[in-house]
Image (cartoon, helix red, strand yellow):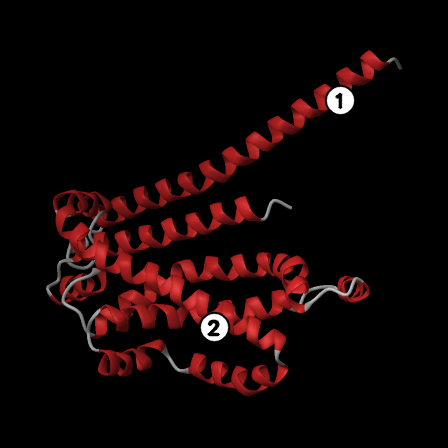
Amino acid sequence: MNASSSFEIDKQALLLEKKAEQRGRLEAIALPLGTLLVLLVLWEFGVRFFEVPPYIAPAPSDVATTLVDKFPLLLTNFWPTFQESILGFIVGNLAAVLVAIAFVHNKMVEKAFFPLAVFINTIPILAIAPILVLIFGSGLSAKVIIAGLICFFPTLVNMVRGLQSISPQALELARILSASKSEVFWEFRLPASLPFLFSALKIAATTCVIGAIIGEWVGADVGLGSLILDSTFNFRASLLYATVLMSSGLSVCIFAAVSITERLMIRW
């Protein structure tokens, strides 16, 4: 086989690989969208056919109409929840990363405080939220703390696991090279922990919104959580579903931002 034939074979293999990759990406987008479309059609048909009262389960078309008609109201309540979710996401995950670093570098600190972190995590967030509102008031700080607290423990556990996942061979190499603790952290521990960290951040992308909404349930007159309660008590089902859709969209946007950042930072 000459060099020209070998080059053509490699070129064909590369083209087939690219086509397979493009087909996989298309399926990853088309299949969920197709499934969602089918479910919406079945939902619309079921509500119309069985004549379900709109205050119990509105049709998707009614929810879409409400989403357009009440968009200014939804947007007004969206921004407070957005602010609380983002600040809670940053504060909770940053605190978890710092505590995880302290645990890894000082075993006495880990033994002293890790059981306390586990105990706090066992308390339902709905039970903690009223206490935090009593302490910090019904302003922004209480919601941010609630959102941060619900993000804290999963990130702490994953970050500790990631920082400890460095191989013994790498640690031995660092010892032979007389690397300092900071050099071991930046060159070995931190890169090894990034996949674990981003896995936790993807969980936190959804839980931070849940925490913000729970905080608004306990004490707030504005925000998506407050609007959910108001819509429920007044049997405005279409507005309720539209509000839930807005909160879900916020979680999806944060999750997408985390995923894009992960692809940019973890190229290996």
Image position, residue 19 (x, y; %)? 60, 26
On the question of residue 207 being in view, the answer is: no
Mark 1 or mark 2, which is nearer the start of the sequence?
Answer: 1
Q: Which residue is mark 2?
A: 153
* Quadrant of res 222: bottom left
Q: What amino acid is labelled 2 in the image?
A: Phe
Residue at image location 19% in from the left, 52% down from the top: 58
On the question of residue 249 being in view, the answer is: yes
Marks 2,1: beta carbons within 8 A? no
243 on left or right of 94: left
Image position, residue 254 (x, y; %)? 38, 52
Residue at image location 28% in from the left, 62% down from the top: 84
Q: Is residue 102 above or below residue 58?
A: below
Disc ID at residue 10: 1
Q: What amino acid is labelled 1 in the image?
A: Asp
Q: Secondary structure at mark 1?
A: helix
Number of residues whose C-alpha sits closer than 10 Å to that of mark 1, classed few (under 14), some (14–19) or many (20 or more): few
150 on left or right of 233: right
Q: Alpha-carbon distance for marks 2 and 1?
A: 49 Å
State the residue in front, 64 or 265. Answer: 265
* Comparing labels 2 and 1, the label whose residue is closer to the camera: 2
Q: Is residue 159 above or below residue 132?
A: above
* Quadrant of res 131: bottom left
160 on left or right of 254: right
Image position, residue 61 (x, y; %)? 21, 43
Number of residues whose C-alpha sits closer than 10 Å to that of mark 2, classed few (under 14), some (14–19) or many (20 or more): many
Q: Is residue 17 above or below residue 92?
A: above
Q: Secondary structure at mark 2?
A: helix
Image position, residue 49 (x, y; %)? 22, 47
Disc ID at residue 26: none
Residue at image location 55% in from the left, 87% down from the top: 112
